[in-house]
Amino acid sequence: MEQETDGWRAFLFDQMLRGIRLRSSVYFCPQFRQPWGFSVARNCAVFHIVMKGSCWLQVKGLPTPSHLSTGDFVVVTRGTEHTMRDSHSTPTVNFFELVKSLAGNKNSPLLVGGRGPVTSLVCGGMVFENAAIDPLLAILPPLLHIKAGSNGADQWLGLTTKYVLWELDNGGAGAAEVVTRLADILFIQAVRSYFDESADTTSSGWLAAARDPQVGRALKLLHERPQKRWTVSSLAAQLAISRSALAARFTKLVGEPPLKYLTRLRLNTAAVRLRSTNDKLGAVAFEVGYESVAAFVKSFKRQTGMTPGQFRQMRQPNPLK
């Protein structure tokens, strides 16, 4: 059973990571002298890499602050309001107001604060193409903290960050696209590290569901064939358990009922196709399990606030600018 569990869990992890796609990213390279502190809140994932020094991170809603030191990488997955500062008592200012007041280029080093030791950061935001419907974003915790040296972070984080900074400094043709793809890599690595560290210890949530004998297999079936006309009864029959038992356990572990999860999975698959192909709406709707374009459009608009056609054509403003 353990080998079987590892098999479907690896499949699910791969499916989740494969769907990561950033629409845009932006970077800042601030240097702070003690005392210093700033706050950030944005409607997208926000990350910080400590290149030198140390600081405290406090995410609103989390009970305790996190101490960061050289080489640490953190992602505030939903852009929740948070503070970064040299000590718990240092006052903070809004980061973007600080940048505007300095009239600095967002990709150029910013040196602010007092006269004490310097902490150097690489900070930025990650705007996802399918944030409203991506199953991965829904199951991640508010904060991912990759400590220096964990799971080879010194290697992949150091190399990727150096490449990012080189692109920002040189600003050649396609630099914006290159750094966005590098942000893809940073986020994928952060999620991989989270999966590796938490998969066997988390007692609730999607990771616990992925190793559960019934719910894990149910998730695998949904991800393998999202276009199938699943019902809770047909899914339970595949697992040889009762409908009520599956519905209750799935909802408890995943946080939502099986068919609601399936809807998001289908719409995320559709969103990827809308942005990456010129397929007609009818073909997209059929491939993800909808019997009619009307039903697909209604479901898509309910979840994202726009029609599939609007989603395909629209390039939404970057919330980090």
Image (cartoon, rainbow, N blue to C red):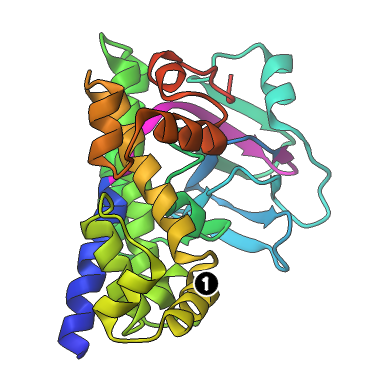
Q: Which residues are magenta?
A: 19-39
> Is residue 60 shown above or below 203?
above
Q: Position of residue 45 (x, y in %)?
A: 52, 41
Residue at left offset 55%, top offset 17%: 317
Q: Nearer the viewer, residue 252 or 21?
A: 252
Residue type at mark 1? Thr
Q: Position of residue 247 (x, y in %)?
A: 48, 75
> Is residue 63 shown above or below 202?
above
In the displayed structure, does residue 180 sit left or right of residue 28? left
Residue at left offset 39%, top offset 41%: 267
Q: Position of residue 64 (x, y in %)?
A: 70, 68
**Direction bottom: furthest residue:** 1
Would residue 186 be counted in the magenta stretch? no
Residue 278 in view of the camera = yes
In the displayed structure, does residue 46 sit left or right of residue 166? right
Q: Count all numbered tags in the image, as a single digit.
A: 1
Residue where numbered disc 1 is placed: 251
Give the overall secondary structure of the magenta segment. Answer: strand
Residue at left offset 38%, top offset 46%: 187
Q: Nearer the viewer, residue 218 or 123?
A: 218
